[in-house]
Every structure is written in C-alpha cells, then in structure tokens.
Amino acid sequence: MNSSRKIILSVAVPIPLNHLFDYLPPDNYDPQHLKTGIRIKVPFGKQSKIAVLIEVKSGDDKNTSKLKQVEAILDTEPLLSAKDIQLLNWAKQYYHHPIGDVFTSAFPTTLRKGKSSELKSIDYYLPTAEGTEVVESRLKNAPKQLALFKFLKSQPGAISSQEIALHFKLWRAPLKALIDKAYVCTSNQPVFDSTHLNITQQTPLIANAEQQTAIDSISTQLDQFAVHLLEGVTGSGKTEVYLQVIEQVLERNLQVLVLLPEITLTPQLEARFKQRFTVPIETYHSQHNENQRHAAWLKLQKGHSSILLGTRSALFTPLPRPGLIILDEEHDSSFKQQEGFRFSARDVAIVRAKVLNIPIILGSATPSLESLYNVDKKRYQLLRLPNRAGNAKPPSMSLLDIRNQSLHKGLSPPLIREIRKTLAKKQQVLLFLNRRGFAPTLICHSCGWVAQCSRCDANMVVHYKQQKLRCHHCASEQSLPRQCIACKSEELKPLGLGTERVENALHQLFPEHKSVRLDRDSTQRKGALKQHLDAINQGEVDIILGTQMLAKGHHFPNVTLVVLLDVDSGLFSIDFHAPERLAQLIIQVAGRAGRAEKKGRVIMQTRQPDHPLLNTLIHQGYQAFAQAALAERKNAQLPPYSYQALLRSLSHEKDIAFEFLLAVAELINQQTNGTLVLGPVAAPMAKRAGQFRFQLLLQHSKRKQLHQLLNWLMPEIAKLKLARKVRWSLDVDPIDLY
C-alpha cells in the first residue's frame, strides 16, 4: 500500500441510520487484528459505541482528514464469520433495517457492552487412572464421594463444576476430598470432538414406519441445503425424529441449532436432550442472566459445545461447524420479532441454512399456511407423521352448544357433568381459556360506566386477588375501586371470564379436587412453573386451568378431557391471520388429551356450533382447513399469494401520526410499479400507552417489485420533516395487522 494512503475502518454502529461510518485505526494497532467481524470501540457524538468492523479500505489524506480515531480494538479474532456477515447483510437488505441494529442483534448484551470475548477459565474434572474397583473399595465408607466418583467415571470425558452441580446438591466437599486423595484431577477446557467418543448414553426409541421414513429422508441430505417440513400430529414423535437425525449430525462432529418458540418449553426439552446425548449442550433465552447467555454464546462460537437450544434471540449465534438447524413449532407467531428489528426467525433460519448449505427441519402439528404453500411450490419437502406414537389414539372432538344455557362462571351444566365423570375415573382434566385475570371488564350495574385504561383504547382487567385493575397492553394499574367513578354507586360488577375467575368456580364446584392455574400471573416466581408441572405429572393435581402456555409441548399422560371454554372470541377478527391462528390453537390444545393409552376427548364450548371453521376442523382435520384457507387467500390475493409491508407511526399528537403516513402515501403514489397502497388508517387499537397509532399497508403480487419500492422509499422517508416528529417503523411480512 502507498505510504501516503491511510487505512480506513468502515464499521456498523448501533444507531437508527442505515449506513456505515468510517474511522481511522488507533495508534500502535496490529494490522493482523483488523479483520471483519471484530468489535471496535468508537467515539460517536459525546458517547462511545461498540461497533462491528465490516470493511477495511484505504484513502488519502484529503479523504481522511476529518475522520475520528478508533478508541480501542476489542477482539483479536473475528466473532462473526464471513457467512455470518453474509446472512446479516441479507437480513438488513430484506427487512430494510439499519445495519448497526441488525449486526448488534447477533451478539448477547454483554458483548454489545464491550465485555471480553474470552471465556473464563473453567475447571473440568475427570477420574485419575487408578483402577475403579480399588477406589470404590476405599470409598465404601464415604457414600457421597463414592457416588460422585462413579458419576465422573460414567462420563465420556472431563466435565465442569456446573454440570456436576446439576446432578449433586452438595458436591464441593466430596469433590475436594476426591482431588486431595488424587482419585480425581482437573483438566483444561475441552473442545468436544464427537468422532472419538460415544455421543449417546441412552438407546434411541424404535421408530415406527412413518418416523423411519422421515429420518431416512432427512439423513440422505445432511450434506446439502434442504427444507424439510415435518408435519406430525401431537404425540406422533417429532422429537424422536429430531434426536435420531441430530445423532447422525453429531457423529460428523458438527453443531446443531434448535430453536423453540417459548421459554417454558426449553427445560423439558433440555432434559430430554441431556438424557440422550453426552455432548455439551447449551441453552439461550431471556430467563437466563446476561452472564449465562454470554457463556453459552461463546461456547458455541468457539466450538466448545455441540448443541444450542434457544428461543428467537439465539438465531444468529455463530457456529464454526454447522450441521443442522431445527425450528420446532414453526407456525408459532413468537418467532416473529415485533419490536425494533422485526425479523422472522423462521424465514431467516431458512436463509441461514441456505448460506451454510445445511438442512433445516421445520416441525409442527399445524404448519403455517406459508409453509404448506411452499410445499405445494416444491420448495419444501413434506414429511408426515399422521399417527400418534405407541398405542395412543387421537382424541375425539365435539362442540358443546351453550346458547340459552345457564352458565356457572363460564361452565355449562353438561360440561360440569363431563368433568365430574372424568375425575371419578381418577383421570385429569385440562381447561383452556386464553384470558388471564379475574374478568376482562369492570362495569357499573347502575349507570353502565366501564373501567377503561387512560392510556389505551382498552378496558382495564380485574385482578381480584391483588385487588387491582390492570391494563394488559401498557401494564398500568390502579387499585380496584369500591365505587363507580361516574355515579358513586357501589354496584360494580366484573363482566366476562378470566382464568382467575374460573379458578374460583372450580374451587366451589369441585372442592375435594386439587386444581392448579397456569398463566403468566401464577408462574412469575422463578421455578413456579416447573413445580406445578411436576405436581401435575406426579398425579397431585386433578384439574389444570391455563392460558396459551399450556397449548404446546407439554406431555400430560393422565389428561383425558380437554376443554376449550371459549372458542368464539377468535372467530370474528379483522385480521385475515386470525382463522389460521385459531385453528392452530384448537389443534394444539386438543393435542394435550389422551397422550398415553387412555382415549382422550376434547370439548369446545361455543355459541357458533354451525361455524364452518369449527366443523371443518372437527370432521376433516387441520389439513382440510388449511387447504380451504389457502383457497380463500388465493381468491382474495392475500399472502402467501402476495407480499406485504406495513408502515406504522406513533405519536402523542394524533394529527402528526396520521399526516406523516399521508405524506409517505403521497411519495409512493409518485411511483408506478403496481403496489397497492391501503391507508393510512388508525390501527385497530388506535391509542396504546398514551400514543396514537396509524398504519399504511403496502401490497404487491411480486416480492421483487415490493422490495424495489422499499429500497427507494426508505431514504425518501428519512428526508421528510415529519419523520423526525413521530416514531415510525417498517414491518416486512407482517403477521399482525394492528
């Protein structure tokens, strides 16, 4: 390089501007450390920011005279590989989101703050070479030491103190004693190599014909990109298919990324994976603290661990030896980020598999309409598991017409009789109601006043135990009033059903039976959910009542009756996604019934017994519903037969939020590329958390044309004066039109 030329570092800074920023390297830097994918600390305004190096280039004195100098180079080796950077660049372009935010999302919070990317040294322990029988005879009077020694002897290699702590409560003293006696020694942190060890410690289950077909089909394509849609009815053994395919991937000494929609599903799946495999397994989700996520991310990034189980935020974790991606419950809306960088973890995971040239498995009992559309287009391979594993039979489903019936807190007399019959057989009952709290509305019986949130277009929810009114949209709360605000009457009545109110009814109707409520309110305390689930599986609970957290993943062998207390609320919605979501929810909840040898039943209370969606699901199943729904979408030219992007605006001033989108619509109308512009209109919830909300929907029959428009539009929006007076966002492929 010419001596008059200077090195310039182009970095992605985590701010809402979609371009790179140039800096000069620090004094006394090592040129070998200037590699794309490292973190750099840079001055930005009056602050310092942690940025990611994207490009190293050169410039002359004239071009570099105004450039600031980097404060520090934080990494000696890249944290992101070239393919990681390729994926993040694709995501930035597809979602039209600022590059700094996109790249920052690939890191855990600790690394975003500049924490060291070196793993803390962890002591690993393994038995010394002395004969097992000799040691065991010497330890016969020290049972804790003997148990720990046997455990260490059974492991395929050295294990950490964290892993020991998972199996032994009081382990420090016995371990110290074993080390002092030279029966156990410490070792350096191992990089796991499964080619030299047994990777399983539990014999796989014998696959049935459908499972084996799926396993064989995926296994023949382990060395190339392919999307496998594993559609399996609830209880059909999808997890066993995952485990047997993962085993083959681990035998090649490759890594596996498993994404789950819910944190609540992670512990039980983690337990099942650890029972099966000897390889190091990490978990990554928001219930872990920052240090736990930091360690898990680095263990995968450095190749020390072989499997990562995580939620949406784990998607971008670097894998030096990638072999397989699995996305369980692929239809779940939790895979779509709804704030900031609004990406779909499912869609980005598929692109990541393509970039890495590895297979991806999408698993679901109720695949999304988009995935079924892609099967029809031969982009995905459909693998079906139509039967429950073992002797379990599918549950019978029926509608219970509750019109003109006298309900006791939402429970009809025929339903109460069915619950009694089930409990008399010593079997468990599961009641599903997707509405927490005591009641969704508090109304004055005298004047009709309704308790409404002052910051949202929503009613306050009654939480009777806490004596609170709470808004489930902005979290504002107040004490439960004793008098009507409008007329001072004390005739305040809770209206409608919440899980807390149904729980009270169950205590009144079935006082001799133990019931448990599972919702966000009752499981806030750490470990509460696991406690409840253990009690259910040990037969200590007769009636389970809960919200959507019960809908998927849980295995309750003794539940033979599942009740959906209110299916009607999902039948009438302005969002075209609503019927699909309701159908998926019904099938998922129904899947909790009859998971073992006992026949299961599903009862749905409804005032719409003739509704086509409900009858199609009951009599023909989810596949028939999905085909009918896809035909409706095609006729209406709705996704997946077209492509959408939603612009949202928020402001404390109603007129400004509307006028901003009006100006955007006028910009778009200057173009003639056939994009349909709908709006601007008020969002279905027009006011939320004190802000007025409007939206503008863009739709085109061709994805390429829609993105060409967005490429032109985004810089133009930034030039609008009103853009600085509102909070606005773009949502590509929106899943919620609210």
Image (cartoon, helix red, strand yellow):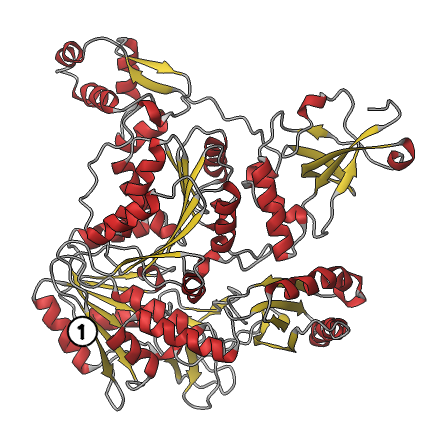
Q: Does residue 85 appear in this view?
A: yes
Residue at x 26%, y 29% (from the top left corner) = 168
Which of the 4 image quadrants contains residue 386?
bottom left
Task: Give the answer, above or below, for where 211 lies relative to 603.
Answer: above
Residue at x 56%, y 43% (from the top left corner) = 106
Query: In the picture, which quadrant includes the C terminus?
Result: bottom right
Pick the front one: 684 or 596: 596
Residue 518, x across and y down, in percent: 31, 60
Pick the front one: 261 or 479: 261
Residue for badge 1: 509
Residue furthest out toward the right: 62
Task: Give the answer, above or below, for where 303 lies relative to 639.
Answer: above
Residue 217, x across and y down, in percent: 32, 48
Which of the 4 image quadrants contains residue 210?
bottom left
Q: Is residue 623 left or right of residue 38?
A: left
Q: Does residue 104 appear in this view?
A: no
Query: In the picture, which quadrant includes the N terminus?
Result: top right
Residue at x 12%, y 68% (from the top left corner) = 422
SS state under label 1: helix
Task: Give the answer, above or below, for where 445 lies relative to 601.
Answer: below
Residue 303, x across and y down, in percent: 46, 29
Residue type at mark 1 is Leu
Pick the front one: 253 or 496: 253
Please count the marks in the image: 1
Q: Is residue 592 left or right of residue 631?
A: left
Residue furthest out toward the left: 425
Which of the 4 image quadrants contains residue 177?
top left
Q: In this view, does 80 lie to the left or right of 502?
A: right
Residue 522, x across and y down, in percent: 34, 58
